[in-house]
Image (cartoon, grey):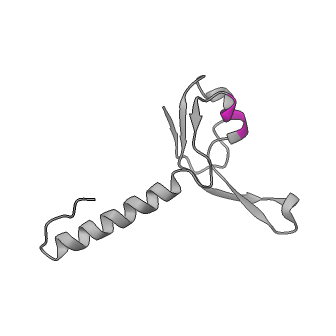
Amino acid sequence: ILVAAVGRPEMVKGDWVKPGATVIDVGINRIPAPEKGEGKSRLVGDVAYAEAAKVAGAITPVPGGVGPMTIAMLMANTVASAYLAAGLKRPSF
């Protein structure tokens, strides 16, 4: 399992990935996208997706990969903290 969270766009190249590995790309970076027009940008992860996908057994995309899970867990932890702060039992989700 390879978890990439380095904060550099497409830093992890395909030849860094062990064949069949599970790649979890936590990074989110905005880079220029001239193909979309003047001043436009696109989101990429810390993994060079096209290269790594050829080697990996499974890989998370950016955008749409771990971001939704991060938001869900942030919300769950916020609600749990509010319960605890109010002196209530932590909810079970």
Residue at the spot 42% in from the left edge and 61% down from the top edge: 72
State whether residue 70 is above or below residue 16.
Answer: below
**Residue 38 vs residue 75, the one in the foreground:** 75
**Residue 85 vs residue 13, the one in the foreground:** 85
The magenta stretch is 50-54
Residue at the spot 65% in from the left edge and 27% down from the top edge: 55
Q: Which quarter of the figure has residue 35?
A: bottom right
**Residue 15 vs residue 62, the one in the foreground:** 62
Question: Is 38 positioned to the left or the right of 30 in the image?
Answer: right
State whether residue 64 is above or below residue 50.
Answer: below
Q: Position of residue 71 (x, y in %)?
A: 45, 62
Q: How many marks?
A: 0
**Residue 21 vs residue 45, the one in the foreground:** 21
Q: Which quarter of the figure has residue 19?
A: top right
Residue at the spot 12% in from the left edge and 74% down from the top edge: 87
Question: Is 78 positioned to the left or the right of 62 in the image?
Answer: left
Residue at the spot 62% in from the left edge and 55% down from the top edge: 63
In the current view of this chain or complex, which residue is farthest to the front?
A: 93
Is 35 contained in the magenta span?
Answer: no
Prevalent SS, magenta region = helix
